[in-house]
Image (cartoon, grey):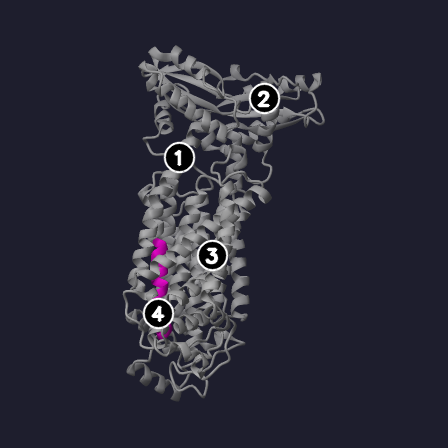
Amino acid sequence: MRALARLVSGRRSSWAVLGGTLVVVALLFALLPSDDDDAFPASGLPDTSQSAQVQALLDDFPSADATAGVLVWSRGGAELSADDLASISSRSEALAALSTTPEAVRPQVSDDGAAALVAVPLSAADVDADLDGVATSLRDAASAGLPDGLTAALTGPVGFQDDVSNAFAGADLRLLLVTVLVVAVLLIVTYRSPVLWIVPLVVVGVADGLARVVVSALASAADVPVDASISGILSVLVFGAGTNYALLLVARYREELLHVDDRDVAMRTAVRSAGPAIAASGGTVALSLATLLLASLAGNRALGFACAIGVVVAIASALVVLPAALVVCGRGLFWPFVPRASSSSPGPHGHAARRPGAWERLGRGVQRRPARVAVAAAAGVGVLCLGLGGYAVGLSQTDQLLGDPESVTAQAVIDESFSAGLTSTTTVLVPDTATADAVSVAEGVDGVASATAGEQADGLTRVDVQLDAEPESDAASATVQALRDAYAGAGGAVSDALVGGGDATAYDERTAAAADLRLIAPIILAIVFAILALLLRSLVAPVLLIASVLATFAASLGASTWLFRHVLGFDALDTSVTLYAFLFLVALGVDYNIFLTTRAREERLRHGTREGMVRALSSTGGVITSAGVLLAAVFAVLGVLPVVALTQVGVVVCIGVLLDTLVVRTVLVPALVFVVGDAFWWPSRAGRGAGAGAGAGAGAGAGAGEGQAQAPQSPSPSERAAASAATKSSR
């Protein structure tokens, strides 16, 4: 870190770093291919799942390239008139002309007479090639010349696919603009400067663009499906983590500028002091994300692949590009509150007495009654955990998009007037010799509306099963499992039946997501423990810090579950939300643990454990709070996309980061340190100032102002010489 600090802070080398960075970034943007994808693909089930096996076997069937658009006509619940029915019949003929099987396009009228629908068989290849064009043609053909008050809506596979695609159309630009705006406003408020915010925002913005280009190129080479949803999370993570690291570095740089006149020396000390914390916290996040490469779902692997690369780029920008840019721009970048060394300061790292700031007062208040504060904070976290009583996973198909997209409203009409499962067919593949038995078994399962034997290929028969339940709902999943159990227990050739289709795929995805969580979570915790143990040289500290992070995760998930169910109207979480929330809250929560405890460890060497924690909180409380609020706001930006899964991830992480920042990291963790004392650092020995720590608070040296705590170590001889020379010829 010393060599890097010298490189990015030198008078000439800082310019060289910026110039070299511009050249490298320009070359990467120019040479690396980009691949924009607005799609929202399936999560990618493992080949061992029944759904994946069925999908692979269906490739050999005559209808392998078939999909369907479902058109629904209604009058808002009123009965259809004779003119309406005549018009629907005419529209069906127009739709038949667009179908691969015109004779199958026949209108069905509901028993209550309030709705009619037509299923239009289509070529899946044609739909994939021009989804928007096919959907538009279907809507135009279904709605042309309808009587007043009669409406047509597109749903089914094509309708939902088109609505999801439209939800992500232009998502990257929209998400980027809102993210930049949020970050800019919060940086201006944090720095209280009309100029300073521009530098970290530009650096992080370039890092985001570079991460996108690098991820796109590497994903294409590795055949990893990075879609629009992953790109959105990638941007949010790079901006959030990058600005967090920037806040930490700038805060330490500003602190050093109050002690020395030479900005090169100040930046060198800032990078040496804050650099290890930034590298460790960023490395923890990157390694935690990399564990997703072990997941069974392709979507999880793609997220880990993309975001791990993004975090590495963010770390590089914070430790290489940002310091050089700050040094080049000079001290005036902080205008109008330009930090200058006090004339009474004894030199580098020296400081005059200051009035205690808010964070120091908070620390000393916690220090006076640590056990009581720890119990109160833990009780508050425990109350939020009570929301987990309503925890459920798995959204139905109509609950996966926000607002009222056409496919959702049309499905609601079908649920009301037809069978809820009409638009989603479950596919069973059985040996030809067991076809009759397969149909019989299916018809005997509760929740099955009908079962019909269909086409054959390679010794297998396709049995189309229609369920009573809404597509991808809990009831549909229960019926799928009941079907599989019934076939497995039937004996004979029928026991070889495989159950697939849309509902089975959703059920298998839910099962695989739960398995991924059980696999990934312990690995992430092990990585976090190892990094904390190495960084802090302690075995007790990592246990307490990880316990606090897990408590934050449980509380945020509980609070979010209550909010989703009782305020936002989401009955359950999307299958990916729990794993993503755990990953981001644990990995990013460790960031703040590292920022606080590494500073506490430095201060401990001079002032002891308890006084060191007070000084660490005084030094880092402001920057941790600013970073947490910014990160929470950035993740909340995911709510601008009309996709429930991303909104839920944003809400859970936002609540968790705020809870971690405002309560756990600033109150609970210091209280635990005050309670356990030097044992927090076991097996490391107590710091040199341990014996004097208790009374240090009354001295002038303890009076560091908010965000301006003393530096933890004495300057080296070379730094003293550099500072002395700089004082004589300050730039």
Would you say residue 400 is visible in this rendering?
Answer: yes
Which one is earlier in the sequence, the residue at label 2 or at label 4?
Answer: 2
Please tell me whether mark 2 sits on a helix, a strand or a loop.
loop
Please tell me whether mark 1 sits on a helix, a strand or a loop.
helix
Query: What is the CA distance from the residue labelled 1 to the residue labelled 4?
Result: 43 Å
Residue 196: x and y in percent read: 49, 70
Which one is earlier in the sequence, the residue at label 3 or at label 2?
Answer: 3
Query: What is the CA distance from the residue labelled 4 to the residue labelled 3?
Result: 24 Å
Q: Residue at x 46, y 48 (%)?
A: 232
Q: Which residue is mark 2?
A: 418
Q: Does the magenta run of residues contain 524?
A: no
Q: Which residue is mark 1?
A: 511
Magenta residues (range): 268-286
Query: What is the CA distance from the residue labelled 3 to the residue labelled 1?
Result: 32 Å
Labelled pair 1, 4 in contact (Cβ < 8 Å)? no
Q: Which residue is mark 4?
A: 601
Labelled pair 3, 2 in contact (Cβ < 8 Å)? no
